[in-house]
Amino acid sequence: MMTIPSRPEQRTLAILSSLSYRTGELSSYLYEVAQGVSELIGLDWSVVTYCQGDSERILASTIDLGEAANQVYSLHGSLTGTVVKTGAPLVVENASTCKDYGQAPEGYQAYLGVPLRTSSGDVIGTICSFQRQPRCFTENEVKLAELFAERAATAIDNYQLYQQQQQFNEMLEAEVMKRTLELRAAQSELLTANLELEQRVEQRTAELKQAEAKFRAIVENANDIIFAITPDNVFSYVSPNVADVLGFQPSEMEGNLITSFIHPDDIQACIGEIEQLLSTGQKQSGTEYRAPHKQGGWRWLTANIGLTQDTNGQPLIVGVTRDISDRKQAEKALERLAEIGELAAMIVHEVRNPLTTISMGLNTFKKLNLTERFQEYLALALDEADRLQRLLNQILLYSKPQTLQRSQLALDQLITETLDTLKTIPAASEKYLKVDIASEPIQVLADQDKLKQVFINLIINAYEASNTGETVTVKLYTLRNHQACIHIQNQGQPIPTESLPNLTKPFFTTKTAGTGLGLAIVKRIIEAHEGELSIESSATTGTIVQVLLPLTP
């Protein structure tokens, strides 16, 4: 026989089921936790605190504390301090008669405090509840508070991990961008130096002695290492700045075989380039190899070499080499990001199979004669399973490389067909649509299915952001710079300015039921088409999304 939960148990289940933590929304979630504790136990005031060292901060409170909510409080001599120190729940039935554990806030007598404990066992804060009148607390009430404390601790722990990951991603992205710009600038300098060297070798061969002094003055102040090698692979000259790159003085390298300063695994490739140069006379460029540093370890270098003659008319190999160790590190970081994407795809595949089995099992329960209450529980479980399935699909889509199946595409026709498809969706109900599409055909070379996915996402977003009676505007026209512009505008509430830069970042969302991957996927698809995505929002114009795509040449 099926056991029906009591009304308090039903209310507890309802509150726990309604708790939904989303990345970046910690304050509202913790407020719901505090409110749930106060409601279920029947308390006047509950707070969630975060403790660090000997101080604490209030993260959520069921009553408005004004500026006091932003202050930092000392744990010394407080009830909260006792909970943090012992790591166990604390019950004070009457603070006026029992002052062994600290002072209660003015006007409150009874106190219940439970620690917030992470999965690793660390106490990071408390849930503190107060009652104006003395009262007793049952064991079930303490366990109930501990249940909510577990939810709060998990949310805080996840939020901190998310913040750390965001900071790491931003730092990594900035570092990769910085290194990329430096490498581009270095490449330009190297090409300039190579061109200058080629011109001098070709134009001044007959005046080598006179040119050598000028050449040395230049190379000794250059960022790159300039070197000369005899046909028997011995350094005859190395510029002084080799000390900055490898730690060796030129005198330690000149007169020695080049193989003494090349990684054993790279010697064959380097010697092969020199032999090719000597046999054909053609310049060899972009040879990458590892060279030892005097203090230990290896540095990655790239070299360009050419053939000339010394003062005696004998062949002389001259070259320019540059330190590319930073670029190699950046490339490894990019490879690591690609591996992370592949790992995410593997995890999604592993989760989807058991999730499908769970969904099938839940759907089987539909055939049972369940009470209305359990039908609601079943519907909630199925909705959550469907939501998780959608999230996994979007993570998988985001983690995959954007491979395009391009073809000649009539953009005006595709947008018209997409709008017709979306007319009957619930989000478009009781809202107006204004369409302004250029009369002349607009052709692009694109993947039709992926562009349709982009337009469906953006148009549905516009409908969902609009209120009843408002208008969604869709325009298509061409720009002078040979681009097509798709303009989608709604009159809904403007997006906060601070949120605009984050809209296309993975897992950032302003929707209650959003996954935060829709616009991230849209951006990747548009960029794969060499296009641009821009989002503007204000109280006067509403929200405007523009997609720029290159027209077919």
Image (tube, helix red, strand yellow):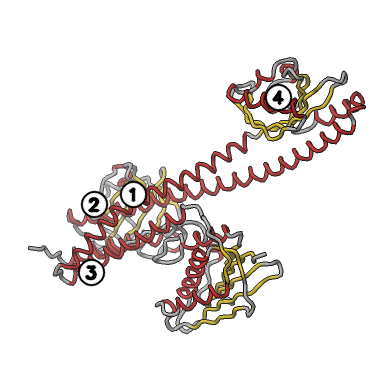
Mark 4 against mark 3, which lies toward the viewer?
A: 4
Q: Under tag 1, what secondary structure?
A: helix
Q: How far apart are the two marked residues, 1 and 4, measured between alpha carbons?
A: 53 Å
Q: Residue at label 2? A: 91
Instruction: Look at the numbered discs 1 and 3 and tell me whether their residues touch, using CB distance below 8 Å.
Output: no
Which residue has dot 1 on it?
Answer: 350
The image shows residue 254 at horizontal and vertical percentages of 75, 17
Can you give x and y, in whole percent of width and height, for residue 412 in the image? Answer: 57, 75
Amino acid type shown at disc 4: Glu
Mark 4 highlights which residue? 275
Disc 4/disc 3 C-alpha distance (Å) = 79 Å
The residue identified by callout 3 is 376
Residue at disc 4, secondary structure: helix
Of the numbered discs 2 and 1, the one sitting upstream in the chain is 2
**Front of the two marks 2 and 1:** 1
Q: Name the residue furthest front.
A: 280
Tell me the crowding category of disc 2: few under 14, some 14 to 19, or many 20 or more residues within 10 angstroms, Cα based. many
**Residue 136 appears anywhere in the view:** yes
- Secondary structure beneath disc 3? helix
